[in-house]
Amino acid sequence: MWGGLLFLCCGVAVAPLLACATPEPKAAPPPPEAPVAEAAAPVSAEPSVGEPAVTNDLSEETFECGETAVSAARAALAAAISEGVAREHLEGCAPEGVRCEEERAPLRADERCQVVAYRRGDRWEILVRPQPAAGAPTRVEVWVDVDGALSGRVSVAGSTWGVLGDVRIEGLERRKSHTHGGPPARIGGAGFRVDNRGEAAVELKLRRVRWLVAGQCEIPREERATPKPAGIAREDGVIDGMMALTIPAGASTTIEIGHEVQSAYMAYCDRFATAAVFAVDGAEVEVIAEHRVIRRTPLRR
């Protein structure tokens, strides 16, 4: 007979304090009392890619980048538009340019749109990485059957891009959790990746912050609060009230911003994000970083 408090994580009872995998938003989310389902592997943006389409000697049955992959990519891009992604944010995303890969790997953003297909049995998992443009989502993921029919899952990132001259700013997705019935997650900052592709250093300034929410799985865009900024620093630095940071020429770095702490409780399919307005040489752009919050459900036995 088991005693004590257990948690249900990915369908298995585990010890308390063990974090669950964070689910990607789905077309038909579970009810609040349901256990947290296992999420698809997250996509980050670390190593650089951009090589030509990969060819290999794997069997045609398990790994083929032919007409079915092109059709799947075409269906995925149409689904992204139907989910509210602006056509201009998919500029350069040609289905014919789809690149097929066997395993998922970190995919760094490029100046051009990238469309990657992963074969998963009788489905294609299509990842779209739009080129940097103000307000463009950082990624779109769509599951498409091999016959080109949508299988129901279309996931548009709540994080966005910002562009200020030669500077590219990408909102980074972060993950938090809380216990079902317990206090909400507390979020007091966000992360961003900054690339200065120019030949001179720039001063990046943090102007203001908005706290965004959504309650029905949609992209978080409803303004709930305007928390006071607490500062900006490099990832390994300390946020101490400074509101500007120098980005050297040709540098790529991850920065953190701080703001007044906000509560984030995932009651059903809630989504949350920090929208930060940055400035370079007087020009401003708003960049959004989403916070994926999950609810851990305790199981008593």
Image (cartoon, grey):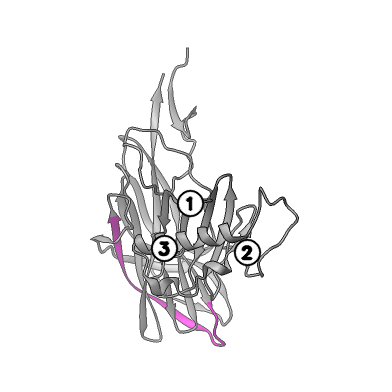
| Picture coordinates of residue 11, whole percent (x, y) | 47, 31
Q: Say which amino acid is labelled 1.
A: Trp
Per the image, the residue denoted by label 2 is: 47
Mark 3 neighbour class, 10 Å CA radius: few under 14, some 14 to 19, many 20 or more: few
The quadrant in which residue 34 appears is top left
Q: Point out the frontmost of discs 2 and 1.
A: 1
Task: Point out residue 8 in the picture as x, y percentages from the top left corner.
Answer: 44, 30
Classify 10 Å Cα crowding around label 1: few (below 14), some (14-19), many (20 and above).
many
Task: Determine the image quadrant of residue 299.
Answer: top left
Which residue: 57% across, 65% down? 98
Q: Classify mark 3: helix, strand or loop.
A: helix
Q: Amino acid at mark 2?
A: Pro
Q: Earlier in the sequence, mark 1 or mark 3?
A: 3
Q: Residue at x 39, y 71 (%)?
A: 87
The magenta span reads 196-213
What residue do we see at 49% from left, 72% from top? 131
Residue with the mark numbered 3: 78
* Location of the C terminus (image quadrant): top left
* Mark linked to residue 143: 1
Q: Work out how far the residue at label 1 is from the one at label 3, CA to CA, in angstroms.
A: 12 Å
